[in-house]
Image (cartoon, grey):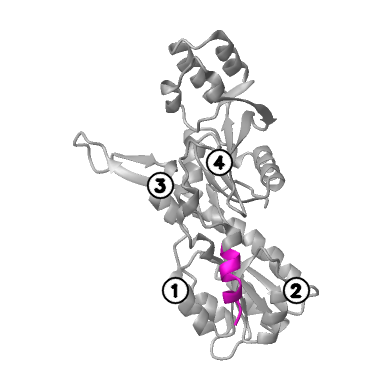
Amino acid sequence: MLYSEIPAAYFPSTMFFVDDSREFLINLTLQLEDTMAFQMYDSPHDALDSLYADYRSPDYLSRRCVTEYLDSHACPATNQTVNLNLATIHSEIYNPQRFSEVSVIVVDYAMPGMNGLEFCEKIQNKPVKKILLTGRAHEHSVLDAFNEGIIDCYIEKNTKNVSLAIIQAVKKLQQKYFQQMSALIVGMVSVSSVACLRDPSFTQFFKKICDENNIAEFYLTDSSGSFLLLDKEANLSCLIVKNRQDLNLHYEIALDNKAPESVLDDLKSGRKIPCFSDSTSLKTVDWSDPSTFLQPAQVTQGLENYYYTIIQDPLEFNIQKEKIISYREYLKINRQKSRF
């Protein structure tokens, strides 16, 4: 995965393939990676029914963790404050149906009863990303649909290695889907704190961390750029990230709590960082034993320096592992249901 900005949350999602040719769909199935969740339909009407039955708007995470409330002192209705509760984001790991969320639909243009363009027009108001498979004869109408935003991508069905082209386009649009889902959250974090989620160097660094640790899903935990990470087996880890502003704040808290000089030096230099995702926890820790909450840190450079550490099986989130369905489990249960 490679993002222009890192979304506040990402988890593997489901693709819909709609084509009246079962032969094409079966051949496409054989080309799909084993780690991709999909559903296939040879009827556009059945696909629409399924989509509307289970569809969730992709801004549900933003609506769940962003609330607006009026100032309590009889202020005018226009005087509003926005409250951002990032803790609600990673609770999505307990949703067993998160992987069923439809992010991309690939639909053939030439289908009897309802062509692919008509299908996309019916779901034009849905933020799900749409790929149209077409032929040269439909080029003019397809270009118009693309320019009007009815479809997000189109691929000629007779393209060489069309399956590979479809898979590449799907992966790119899935990334855009999750960026759109969390655009409000990322915008608020970037304004109120460090803009690491939109820092090109940090996004490259984050991709490297995810690739090296086989991360399948991730969830933002604080405004500094820390993330809860899960691999395909739902093994947990946490990327803790601090910037210089964070370290200065932690240093002041440690100083107020009469922390040992060695701790103050570690915080000031960035050699060690707190393994908490928020600064409030530092006010209640036992400063006589900093080894329980300070971890050696490394530095990655971007628009500024980011100090980070990776914690395996983090305890601070009180995760109930028994309630998590891993992506591997989901695929095992649902893969066969994806076929006709």
Measuring 70% from the left and 86% from the top, which residue is drawn there?
Answer: 23
Q: Is residue 336 magenta?
A: yes
Q: Residue 115: x percent and y percent?
A: 57, 84
Mark 3 → mark 1, Cα distance in angstroms:
24 Å
25 w.r.t. 277: above or below = below
Is residue 105 visible to the viewer in this orientation of the structure? no
Crowding at mark 3 (Cα within 10 Å: few <14, some 14-19, many 20+): some
Q: Earlier in the sequence, mark 4 or mark 3?
A: 3
136 w.r.t. 147: above or below = below
Mark 4 → mark 1, Cα distance in angstroms:
32 Å
Q: Residue 273: x percent and y percent?
A: 58, 24
Badge nearest the viewer, 4 or 3: 4
Is residue 9 visible to the viewer in this orientation of the structure? yes
Q: Which mark is residue 65?
A: 3
Measuring 55% from the left and 70% from the top, which residue is drawn there?
Answer: 150
| Callout 3 secondary element | helix
- Residue at the far right: name it: 160
258 w.r.t. 317: above or below = above
Mark 2 → mark 1, Cα distance in angstroms:
28 Å
Q: Residue 209: x percent and y percent?
A: 68, 42
| Callout 4 secondary element | strand
Mark 4 → mark 3, Cα distance in angstroms:
16 Å
Quarter of the image for residue 109 reads bottom right
The residue under label 1 is which amino acid type?
A: Tyr
Q: Is residue 155 magenta?
A: no
